[in-house]
Amino acid sequence: MTSGLPAGVPRPILRWPHPCLRRPAAEVPEVTEEVRAIWADMIATMEAMPGVGLAAVQIGVALRLAVVDASTARGQAVCMANPEILHASVEPRAHEEASPCLPGVSALISRPRAVTVRFLNLDGVVEERDFVHLWATSVQHQIDHLAGRMYFDRLSRLKRDRLLARARKATER
C-alpha cells in the first residue's frame, strides 16, 4: 500500500448510466486526511476489481481524485488530485480499455503514448510526472472520468451504440 495512507475499504462501483458518471468532478482545494482516506478506499477498490486505475466519481465521490497503478508488482499507486495533462505525445498507442462501471465490454481506444501530468500528490504538493504506455493510458482514462466522459465516448457513434447494446445484453444474462 502507498505509504502515508490509512488502510482502505473497497467501495461499490457506480454502474453506467449513473448521472454522477456524466458530471465533471469538483476541484480539490487541498489534500486533507479525508482526501487521503478516499484515496485509500480507491486503492482498495482498484485492487479488488482488479484494475490499473480508478477515478473518485466511479465510487460516487464527485471530487477530482484519481489513483493509478499499472505496475506489475502492484503497491505502486500514484495518488492524484486535480490531474491535468500538460503535454501529450504525438505518437498514439492503442489499448483495449474497459470500465467496471460498464462490465462485460471493452473497446480498442487510441490515445497518446505518453503524457506529462500536473497534480497535487499525497503530500499536497504540486507534482509534474511523465507517464508512458499503460500508465499513460490509465491516467488519461481517469482524467476523462473526472470530466464526465467514458472511454466509449472516444468511439464513433456506430461503435459506441454497438458497445452499449452489447453491455445491455451482458447485464440481462
Image: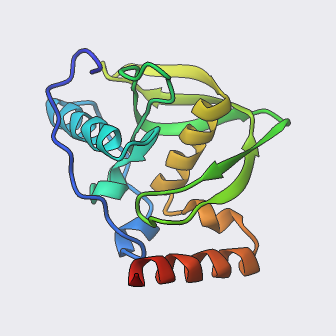
Report the quarter where the N terminus lies: top left
Q: Please give the name of the residue rendered at 41% of the width and 66% of the height, measured from the top-left corner.
A: 21
Query: Which residue extends farthest front?
Result: 173
- In the rendered image, is residue 64 in sight? no
Q: Is residue 87 visible?
A: yes
68 is higher (above) or lower (below) than 169:
above
- Residue drawn at (71%, 56%), measured in percent from left and top? 108
Judge whether 138 appears above or below 132 on screen. below
The image shows residue 9 at horizontal and vertical percentages of: 15, 41
The mark total stands at: 0
153 relative to 6, above or below = below
The location of residue 88, given as percent across then percent down, is 74, 35
Most distant residue in the right direction: 91
State left or right for residue 157 relative to residue 172: right
- Occupied quadrant, residue 135: top right
Q: Residue at x 79, y 33 (%)?
A: 89
- Image quadrant of residue 173? bottom left
In the image, taking residue 115 as reference, residue 5 lies left or right, namely: left
Rendered position, 134 above or below 106: above
Foreground residue among 173 and 10: 173
Furthest residue in direction top, as rendered: 3
Residue 30 in picture, x, y percent from top left: 28, 33
- Front in this rendered view, residue 172 or 60: 172
Q: Position of residue 53 (x, y in %)?
A: 45, 40
Q: How is the image coloured?
A: rainbow
The quarter of the picture where residue 37 lies is: top left
Q: Tell me: 162 left or right of 60.
A: right
Q: Is residue 130 left or right of residue 158?
A: left
At a point 38% along the width and 24% down the height, the residue shown is 121
